[in-house]
Image: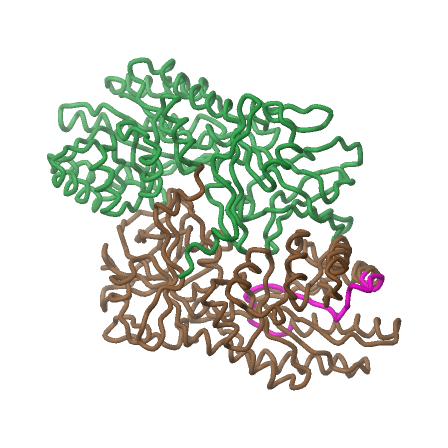
Chain colours: A brown, B green
């Protein structure tokens, strides 16, 4: 059993508190639905990943890049910088947020399977440390842009090592049917190496791979690292020099449910080091500098969403029994993961103790859509009622970042709580905001 | 074979034109990605549904309510009003847009499984014609709000008649495992009738049902109407008076693919009339006033999305053969339907003729996510290349309305084209807009 709540969450007489502030107080001060972010927990996780990389890799430690796609805003970008780790951005928009926050470009890398010429230009102009290249045409675009700025641009090539890893299963194949990267097995990776070497404006530093999302075991990471290191050896054999870097991506799983056993930074990095060391030894290669890209693993556990219950309804099921439908004041606009991926969450009544029987419940949103489900199956107290506060943990990653205005529902705020004080870092949208783009 | 393009789309020498303007001109004037909306087609469809209801139901014609959730903005709300039809809104946000556009509340209905007290208050205060009630607690809320405003509020009760209808299949059951409505079979509907009758502030006008989305055959609508009419008869038998209204919802399918055979307004309404007439005759009931709620059927076919191709990549498949991955400059942020529902679309190169072989292709977006797919399987010319324009038809419904800023990608504009002229009605978001909510 692991803890789905961030470190500063406590329960006092059944009331959820974050950094000592009760859910009822948070709801009345900031409204619902809202994301509440445990700032201390975020900083601790970001720092822990940085330290774990240093501890395991020592002089071969590259950079921990926080994956902005999980969630980013100006204030959070500043925290990432203060925690001493890097930032992975994958669009011009994410880059714009990072630059506006004053995040040092020398600690940023740019991702993306279809970077526009403008995005590449902006990255190079601002001195983004590394561009992770994803296609042959991009090699030409990066070379051209670097030349235009009189720079030599550090790049990694994104490779598909033939591993598809998901929460509880990993498949090792030769080919991956995905849009990302150059396949090692098909020869595309080697072609990309040759193409990159043709451009003096491109400094090929090494390879990148990202094998999946919400992965809860380390095996697949080791296989992926070994395949990348195999290509480093071939490069050394062919060109008589060793590429100095590997970026092994992210995908480290967190606890959405109490039974999930998440990967801890120390264990991830110790395991990665062992794999990398063994693979390099086998090929008589120096250990490269290794970077990683946790996103969800840093921000995911640090937020919960607080909803207010609006209605409850007992529905008779065709097979037998009943289901209690609990409608909250948000839904698929602030958390699309349930309907998009079949993601699972847990929840608690946050404002009181209930000793009522636990009954078969579905937590749904307020959108005009049958698939608008927050939690498909959960046991909740039978006496849950309109006005109750419902807290859903582990919504920090891909919650607010994938939020929409479906049904013109304003997006919820993100409220940072630290040291007994709460402050809005991303405000709630208003109906007026929703008309901003009308001409 | 049906036409997936709106009426003012034509192809001249392989170039797509909308109202005489070439896709190349539209792209260079408004950028990509962008939604282009065929205004004449929209007005014709809205008007056609209004006329079809009149033609089939005559004096028993209620209102065609355009379902705002499919897509709404200020300018489009004005067109809906000008076309003489009503508007179905399901949140305070959609209501706010409608009111800001000056849409007459007397032609609006308010939906939603979890309307807030504030939403109900605003609707009643502004004189929204009908509130479609979805739960017992809402009956109390509506009564209280109406009392507070010294009004008597017209309401319908949303019922689940036990029909689940989807594109190609319909299931008739007793119970539906959904968050919406009162079940007729379980007795919940009758309880709601009794509860509504207790409040003098509530004028119970009849019943509502909505049986599904993107439905391509009429059978299920007839069954649903019959079950509602059965309850109208029971009401008459019990209380000695007839409720005057039925709202049979929306869900009428459109052509996403050439092989889809969409429902036409005249055929829908003629079929509905026949069903309603027969069911009423059987129970010796007067034919009620019938309303419907097409959303997708009006706006869906009127827009296409224009993308620019950024990269192409041939991926070797594990089984055998290859797949051409074509990356465009949008993706799941402007069209989540493919990843959310497995929705299917077609596409054409819009800026030139190609005589190249058609090959197995997947159209993907620029998001940092493997599931970021616009079209999972399509045959496109092998010579498709960066810089080509790709047009995806039938994206008017649930495209822009469900759009997100995932990866901080600014949402595309909606450009209305009419009579050879194009104008932005919803502008493109900027990177500056994306920082609006940061505190």
Indicate whether A276 appears above or below B4. Answer: below
Q: Is residue A351 above or below residue B421?
A: below
Residue A204, magenta (yes or no): yes
B33 displayed left or right of B427: right
Classify the position of the C terminus of chain B by image quarter. Answer: bottom left
Q: Is residue A275 visible?
A: yes
Image spot of residue A266 (x, y percent): 56, 82
Kindly identify the residue that appears in the image at 55 percent across and 33 percent down: B36
Is residue A318 visible to us here? no
For the point 36% across and 28% down, which residue is it?
A: B65
Image point (49%, 30%), residue name: B253
Residue at screen point 42% across, 47% down: A405
Q: Nearer the viewer, residue B134 or B98?
A: B98
To which quarter of the image does residue B359 belong? top right
Q: Is residue A294 magenta?
A: no
Image location (x, y in percent) of residue A201: 79, 63
Q: Is residue B400 left or right of residue A137?
A: left
Residue B117 at what x, y percent from top left?
22, 47
Q: Is residue B175 above or below residue A376?
A: above
In this rendering, the count of numbered labels is: 0
Q: Position of residue B328 (x, y in %)?
A: 65, 46
The quadrant in which residue A233 appears is: bottom right
Span shown in magenta: A196-220
- Quarter holding the N terminus of chain B is top right
Q: Nearer the viewer, residue B212 or B367?
A: B367
Residue B191 is left or right of residue A57, and the answer is left
């Amino acid at each position: 059993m692991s803890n789905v709540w961030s470190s500063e969450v406590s329960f006092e007489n059944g009331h959820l508190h974050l950094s000592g502030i009760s859910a009822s107080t948070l709801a009345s001060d900031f409204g619902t639905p809202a994301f509440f972010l445990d700032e201390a927990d975020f900083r601790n996780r970001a720092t822990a990943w940085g330290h774990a990389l240093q501890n395991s890799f020592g002089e071969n430690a590259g950079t921990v890049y926080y994956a902005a796609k999980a969630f980013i805003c100006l204030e959070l970008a500043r925290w990432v910088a203060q925690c001493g780790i890097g930032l992975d951005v994958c669009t011009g928009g994410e880059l714009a947020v990072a630059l506006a926050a004053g995040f040092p470009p020398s600690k940023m890398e740019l991702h993306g399977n279809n970077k526009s010429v403008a995005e590449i230009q902006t990255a190079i102009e601002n001195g983004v440390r590394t561009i992770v290249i994803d296609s042959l045409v991009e090699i030409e675009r990066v070379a051209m842009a670097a030349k235009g700025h009189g720079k030599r641009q550090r790049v990694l090539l994104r490779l598909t090592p033939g591993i598809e890893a998901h929460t509880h299963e990993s498949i090792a194949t030769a080919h991956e049917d995905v849009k990302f990267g150059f396949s090692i097995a098909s020869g595309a990776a080697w072609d990309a190496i040759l193409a990159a070497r043709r451009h003096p404006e491109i400094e090929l530093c090494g390879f990148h791979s990202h094998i999946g999302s919400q992965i809860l075991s380390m095996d697949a990471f080791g296989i992926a690292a070994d395949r990348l290191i195999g290509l480093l050896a071939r490069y050394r054999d062919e060109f008589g020099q060793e590429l100095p870097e590997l970026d092994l991506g992210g995908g480290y799983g967190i606890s959405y449910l109490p039974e999930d056993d998440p990967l801890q930074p120390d264990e991830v990095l110790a395991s990665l080091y062992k794999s990398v060391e063994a693979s390099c030894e086998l090929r008589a290669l120096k250990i490269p500098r290794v970077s990683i890209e946790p996103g969800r693993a840093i921000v995911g556990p640090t937020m919960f969403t607080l909803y207010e219950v609006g209605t409850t309804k007992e529905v008779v099921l065709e097979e037998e029994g009943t289901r209690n439908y609990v409608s909250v004041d948000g839904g698929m606009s602030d958390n699309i993961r349930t309907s998009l991926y079949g993601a699972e969450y847990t929840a608690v009544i946050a404002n009181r103790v209930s000793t009522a029987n636990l009954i078969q419940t579905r937590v749904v949103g307020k959108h005009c859509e049958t698939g608008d489900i927050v939690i498909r199956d959960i046991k909740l107290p039978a006496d849950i009622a309109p006005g109750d506060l419902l807290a859903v943990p582990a919504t920090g990653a891909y919650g607010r970042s994938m939020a929409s205005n479906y049904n013109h529902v304003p997006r919820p705020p993100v409220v940072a709580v630290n040291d007994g004080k709460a402050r809005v870092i991303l405000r709630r949208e208003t109906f007026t905001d929703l008309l901003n783009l009308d001409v």
